[in-house]
Amino acid sequence: MKQHILLTGATGMLGKVLIQSLLKQDYKVSVLSRKPKQIDQVAIFLWDVYKQKIDISCLNGVDSIIHLAGENISSRKWSEQRKKEIIDSRVLSTQLLFKTLKENKNQVKDFISAAAIGYYGNRGDELLTEESTPGHDFLAECCIQWEKAVDQGNELDLRIVKIRTGVVLDKNDGALKAMAIPVKLFAGSPIGNGKQYIPWIHHYDMMQIYLYALRQSSIRGSYNACAPIPATNKAMTKAIARQLNRPVWPFGIPEKILELVLGEMSSLVTNSTNASAHKLLSSGFVFKFPELEQALTDIYHS
């Protein structure tokens, strides 16, 4: 039997596939959940992040924690209350895990946490590495607080890995499903001038990055999780249209319209983030889908 992994965020797009992949590779898997549920071959433990309650037996025999929990940032508009929930779900959950580790005997050595490319904010064409400064919008502020909470694990002598996740492409979930809807309805069009960089990544490579971080003890600190060959919003829209055999209108959707409809949340599609995958590549990670056309062909036609 390989390591025993404790996972949070098991109901998300990544969490569900990561559990199955870990089990197939003979890892033992336990999950922290807000509600009782059944997952074959997985032990379920309950926690309540907002009440700071947790079943401490979740740590029994655990070697590594993969922390994916956090409120969905795109499920509804960002009121002040919603923004607080988005940040609190990430910060308070991380603090609760570290508090539990500090106060209870355990053998946990690794803490691998989700983070987000939103850390950099809207930066145009600037090439962004893990050493780049953070942005100044809500997404950036959320990521700053999130990562500060994760970094507190260094005080517990844990190996800390922060995976700054890009736009994960999956046919049935997440951003790609939303982007494909207008294209399918013959209303495909870039956003604004379409020059915004989208830090995309195939869902398979995203899962593999977590498995890689789990196996490679030399992996520490922050890593941009995005494909090594970037794409603009315009290129992404056209590539999706080719896969679906649909046209793309030559004019862009004005950003002001999106701001009226989505409010501050429009930054999810209007921000430009040209993130570099160089650090991850230099560590030895190999992408299966480095090119957008290749990734979309696999997603839509494999």
Image (tube, rainbow, N blue to C red):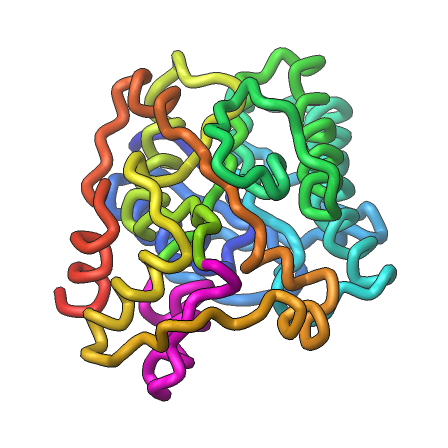
Residue found 22% across the figure and 45% down from its top: 291
Of all residues, the one furthest to the bottom in this rendering is 185
Query: For this rendering, which residue is in front, 255 or 302?
Result: 255
Q: Which residues are magenta?
A: 170-193
Question: Can the viewer see residue 197?
Answer: yes
Q: Find residue 229 and report its horizontal and vertical position in percent.
A: 28, 38
The furthest residue to the front = 251
Q: Nearer the viewer, residue 19 or 298?
A: 298
Classify residue 86 as left or right of residue 193. right
Does the stretch in magenta take in 79? no
**Image-quadrant location for residue 160:** top right
- Would you place residue 253 above or below residue 194 in this image? below
Q: Nearer the viewer, residue 14 or 226?
A: 226
**Residue drawn 44% across the image and 49% down it:** 198
Mark yes or no: residue 8 visible: no
Quadrant of the snapshot with the N terminus: top left
147 sits to left or right of 82: left
The percent position of residue 271, horizontal first and vertical second, equals 57, 50
Residue drawn at (66%, 30%) of the image: 134
Question: Is residue 179 magenta-colored?
Answer: yes
User: Which quarter of the rendered picture does the C terminus lie within?
Assistant: bottom left
Nearest the camera: 241 or 28?
A: 241
Tell me: residue 252, above or below residue 106. Answer: below
- Residue displayed at 38% across by 48% down: 200
List x then y, in percent, for residue 224. 45, 32
